[in-house]
């Protein structure tokens, strides 16, 4: 595709990165868009004409918060992050600096483009190591003489290859060994040009026994025919603790496709929260690779789809080492003619004894026209494990709704109360009060209670 080749040439950068971009684009051109014949994409098809895609226009730096989009200003007034970046399309338009005491300890927080220039050794070491251009081969290691799981279909890497080739910017966080960052760090991404695409990348590295929280937010107004393609790489070294929050609230007309993957080493902990509220079509993959003994992964998510929104979540808890723990809780709400999809897999390798893994998906249906597809799965190749999975889909409790209405509460407010209560066991696990308050505000707007 000549168009993408021209765009690739415009990126520049060191030879190692240019070579990787070129390899990724070559891979992209060999792959088909995943169809319904691919199990992981059975219920979601992306209608995209790649030849018509054009990159989001460049944006200039602003010196005053008042010059930022209103949605960003609103969030900055209600957030408690210690430092943040604001990206509009491919460019950082506003930033705050890290506190001096963290910089002196070796903490790095900047945009990825700058990190390539100023911290090339660290970026080269970790970039593409967790989310490569191709789909990772997460085949379960099975006993001799038995049949392991099938490798992923190569087409599942179509959008990852594009993101690897054409990413323009994103966030880079590096926390050295033993350093704890108390206040969260944040990235606020917006788009302001319809009919374009952005490809972004987030890379967070927590070295041995480090600790950090990173909040990754995306929002925009309605943007017909717009694509947000991304990758998130989370490197959690031995004994480290990383909390990662993704809040997707794009406007109508945006197609969001993102792969998020964590590599969790011995005695390390990864807490992740995926919130999906916006866009017309959203496909989010969240994967945890539990590489070391004692690794722990908490995977939380909530979504609220209404009108004609289509939200697809694909998850993988891959236990490659013994004595590791993972706990997944995904809760969603479907209203109007929306579609919700959840496909989750727990894989336990041969030798990953004493695995303790849970997977739970719950959906609340507010409309008889909405649809939900849920596919929880297990693949276990060890004989001393504790694994469970389950899924439920149910309509709103009419008795509870009647009870609230009979107390003089409007239907919209009553539905907001029931939806918030339904999602509470996810929100209750999130120790970030400003994030929870923001999510509750989106829910209120979704049900028309504000």
Image (tube, rainbow, N blue to C red):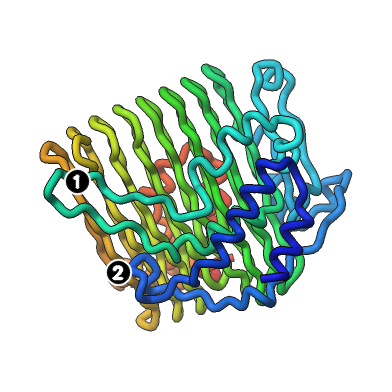
Which quarter of the picture shows residue 107? top right
Q: Please identify, in this view, whether the residue under mark 1 or under mark 2 is nearer the observer.
A: 1
Q: Is residue 126 left or right of residue 191?
A: left
Q: Give residue 358's position: percent from left, percent from top.
A: 25, 46
Quick check: can you spot residue 403? Answer: no
- Which of marks 2 and 1 precedes in the sequence? 1
Residue positioned most to the bottom: 369
| Gap in angstroms between the C-alphas marked 1 and 2 | 44 Å
Q: Give residue 211's position: percent from left, percent from top.
A: 51, 26
Relative to residue 201, is residue 192 depicted above or below?
A: below
Q: Secondary structure at mark 2?
A: loop
Which quarter of the picture shows residue 350? top left
Number of disc labels: 2
Q: Is residue 213 left or right of residue 423?
A: right
Residue at x 46% of width, y 46% of height: 261
The crowding category of the residue bearing disc 2, from other C-alpha atoms within 10 Å (few below 14, some 14 to 19, many at least 20), is: few
Residue picked out by circle 2: 397
- Quarter of the figure with the N terminus: bottom right
Quick check: can you spot residue 71? Answer: yes
Residue at x 39% of width, y 78% of height: 370
Q: Give residue 83's position: percent from left, percent from top.
A: 69, 34
Residue picked out by circle 1: 142
> What mark, if any, has residue 80 been given in the picture?
none
Residue 399 vs residue 437, the one in the foreground: 437
Residue at x 63% of width, y 67% of height: 227
Residue at x 39% of width, y 30% of height: 265
Q: Give residue 442's position: percent from left, percent from top.
A: 56, 60
Q: Is residue 208 left or right of residue 42?
A: right
């Amino acid at each position: 595709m000549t168009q993408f080749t021209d765009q690739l040439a415009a990126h520049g950068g060191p030879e190692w990165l240019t070579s990787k971009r070129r390899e990724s684009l070559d891979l992209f051109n060999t792959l088909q868009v995943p169809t319904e014949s691919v199990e992981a994409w059975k219920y979601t098809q992306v209608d995209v004409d790649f030849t018509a895609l054009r990159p989001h226009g460049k944006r200039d730096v602003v010196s005053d918060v008042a010059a930022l989009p209103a949605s960003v200003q609103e969030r900055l007034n209600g957030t408690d992050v210690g430092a943040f970046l604001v990206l509009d399309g491919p460019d950082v338009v506003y930033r705050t600096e890290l506190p001096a005491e963290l910089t002196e300890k070796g903490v790095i927080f900047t945009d990825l483009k700058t990190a390539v220039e100023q911290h090339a050794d660290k970026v080269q070491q970790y970039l593409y190591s967790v989310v490569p251009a191709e789909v990772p081969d997460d085949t379960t290691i099975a006993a001799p003489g038995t049949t392991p799981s099938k490798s992923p279909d190569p087409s599942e890497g179509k959008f990852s290859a594009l993101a690897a080739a054409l990413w323009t910017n994103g966030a880079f966080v590096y926390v050295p060994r033993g350093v704890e960052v108390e206040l969260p760090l944040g990235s606020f991404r917006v788009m302001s040009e319809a009919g374009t695409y952005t490809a972004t990348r987030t890379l967070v590295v927590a070295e041995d026994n480090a600790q950090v929280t990173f909040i990754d937010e995306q929002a925009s107004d309605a943007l017909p025919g717009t694509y947000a393609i991304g990758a998130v790489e989370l490197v959690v070294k031995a004994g480290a603790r990383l909390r990662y929050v993704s809040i997707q609230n794009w406007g109508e007309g945006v197609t969001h496709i993102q792969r998020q993957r964590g590599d969790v080493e011995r005695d390390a902990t990864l807490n992740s929260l995926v919130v999906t509220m916006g866009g017309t079509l959203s496909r989010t993959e969240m994967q945890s690779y539990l590489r070391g003994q004692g690794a722990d992964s908490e995977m939380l998510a909530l979504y609220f789809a209404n009108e004609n929104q289509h939200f697809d979540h694909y998850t993988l808890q891959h236990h490659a080492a013994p004595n590791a723990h993972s706990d997944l809780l995904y809760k969603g709400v479907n209203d109007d003619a929306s579609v919700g999809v959840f496909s989750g897999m727990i894989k336990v390798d041969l030798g990953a004894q004493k695995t303790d893994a849970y997977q739970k998906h719950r959906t609340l249906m507010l409309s008889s026209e909405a649809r939900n597809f849920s596919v929880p799965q297990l693949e276990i190749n060890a004989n001393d494990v504790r694994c469970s999975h389950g899924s439920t889909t149910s309509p709103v409790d009419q008795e509870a709704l009647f009870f609230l209405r009979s107390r003089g509460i409007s239907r919209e407010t009553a539905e907001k109360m029931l939806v918030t209560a339904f999602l509470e066991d996810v929100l209750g696990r999130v120790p970030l009060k400003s994030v929870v308050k923001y999510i509750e505000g989106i829910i209120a707007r979704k049900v028309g209670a504000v």
